[in-house]
Structures are given as C-alpha cells and as structure tokens.
Amino acid sequence: MTSPPEPPDLAALEHAVQRALASGSTAGLHVLGQGEISLVLGHPAGAPTSACKRLPRFPDPESFSRYGEVQAGYLDALSARGLRPAPSALHRVPGDDGVVGYVVQPLLPAERVAPEVLRQVPPDPDHPVVAQVVEHVAAAVDDRVGVDAQLSNWVVEASGRLTYLDVTTPLLRRPDGSTELDLDLFLAPFPWAMRGAVRRFVVPGLLARYHDRRSVLLDVAANLLKERLDPWLPAVVAAANRHLSGPAGAPLSVEEVRHDYASDARQWEVLLRLRRADRWWQRTVRRRTYPFLLPGRIAR
C-alpha cells in the first residue's frame, strides 16, 4: 500500500464545503461515496488524489486531540489483529466556532473496492475476498474491538490482500464495557431534540452489533443487498457459517439476512428523514446554515 498522502489544501476543501452548506448543494464537491452518516470527498475536486472524510465539528482543540488518541489506538488494535488499515492521517482545520477534522487517505481505484471486484466473477464461498473478510471478522471482533466489515469498507490490493477503509469511527471498548468513542461526536449529525432518544434507544444496540461476530457477519451478508449483489448472498452466508458454530453463534440463513436488512434499512431511512427535516427547519425557519452534508437518495 501507499503511504499516507501529504496534507492536501484542506482549508480550500473546507471553504468549498462551507459554500456547499450555505447553498444546500454539493455541486462544487467531488463526492466519492456516501454512508448513512457522512460523505467521503475527493480532493482536489477536478483531479482528486485524496479521499477526505469530514468529521463533525469539535468544540475545542482538546476534544480533537482526544479523538486523535482514540483513533490512533483503534488503528493499532486493528493492525495487531491482522487487519491492514488504509494509510490514514488526521488533520485539523480551525473554524470560527470550533475545530473541523478530516481523516485523509490516498485515493484508491474504485474498481478495486470489494463490491466491484465481486461483480466481475460468479459467486463462490471460497473467493479470496469473501474468505478474507470472514477471517478478519473472526480474528478481530470481540468485546474490545469492533469492526464495520461491510464489503464497501474493503479494497483489494494488487497482491490480493485486503485493506480496511472505515477507520473514522474508533470502535473500542474499555475493560468495563464502556465505549471509548465520543458519543457526542457520534450524535452530532442528529437533530438536537432527538439525540437523547438516539443515545438511549439506538446507540447501545448499534454499537453492540459491531462487537458481536455473528452480528458483524450478518451485516456483511446484508450489505450485499444494498450493493445489488443478491446472487452472492448464499455464498457469503455459507462462508460466514463456517465460523458460526457452537459458542460463536447459530448459523445464518438467507431469510434472516433479508429480514435484518429490511429492518436496518427502515431504521436508517427514518433517521435520514429526520435529519433532512431538521435541515429544512434550520435553513427555512431559523435562517441558519445547516452544518452537515447529507447524502442524497440512498438506494436500499
């Protein structure tokens, strides 16, 4: 893999983001990908060389530093368990009312992202991409370390080895079971009025899934439906079930995967609609700039 890129002109990128927030349009940005919470931006927009993920605004430099320490610990924990995190650098951009952070990675070829690789070949439970993802989950996930192992979070190197991309949410737990993740940062994109309910009723179950091997493998299989890789579902379920016997948990079924995906999609769609409603309220009624970039229509 390449080394972390030299720091791009993030001040220019942040200026473009601010223009997008003010206008309500991402037309001036190069959007590489969109998740349920945030967007990944290519920079420079005309000919991107870096993938930049903008984090929610930090209230002060100290909170930014604390996030950096937890993220660095997460990268170390992943590496110690055999995963290969993408070279990542955390950078800060001072703002008028806090600190904006970006996690910057080298831009990798889109055709090497795992779903695109699988599109080119027939389904096979022994395909190296599938086998490696399942093995990484089995080796890494436990009460201490969590992983969001969906296929879009992996890129295939020329050697065939996988690199893990999603390192901005450090899924680490302390010995007492509490999360090291700053939940205020995690909850920042949600409307203020609903953060308490999300913290109480959504976050505990959501984070717990990333620390349970069976749940992580269930998510891997369910993500195939979002990626329109339905023919791969039986193969991935078969590969996952090789690691789901006895104490590791009951085997998965295709029916369970489809049901779980539908339930998960409904939950994220409701949360996204609430965020869009909050954006409308902030921009139209309160005449304020909405401080987050929201994904466009997500095919589910």
Image (tube, rainbow, N blue to C red):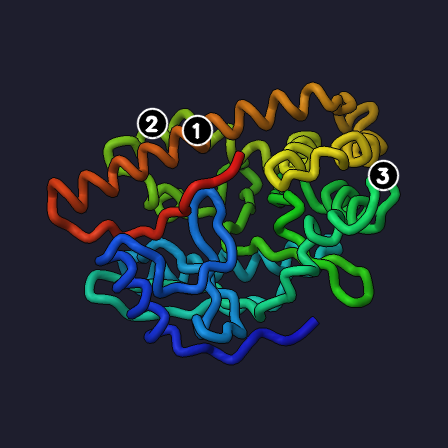
Classify mark 2: helix, strand or loop.
helix
Kind of residue at badge 1? Val
Name the one closer to the observer, 274 or 176. Answer: 274
In contact (CB < 8 Å): disc 2 and disc 3:
no
Q: What is the quadrant of residue 84 in the picture?
A: bottom right
- State the mark number for residue 202: 1
Evaluate whether residue 103 shows in this view.
yes
Kind of residue at badge 3? Pro
Name the one closer to the observer, 220 or 224. Answer: 224
Q: What residue does disc 3 label?
A: 125
Give the mark nearer the N terminus: 1 vs 2.
2
Q: Is residue 300 left or right of residue 61?
A: right
- State the mark number for residue 297: none
Q: Residues within 10 Å of mark 3 (few under 14, many from 20)?
A: some
In the image, residue 275 above or below residue 267: below
Which of labels 2 and 3 is toward the front? 3
In contact (CB < 8 Å): disc 1 and disc 2:
yes
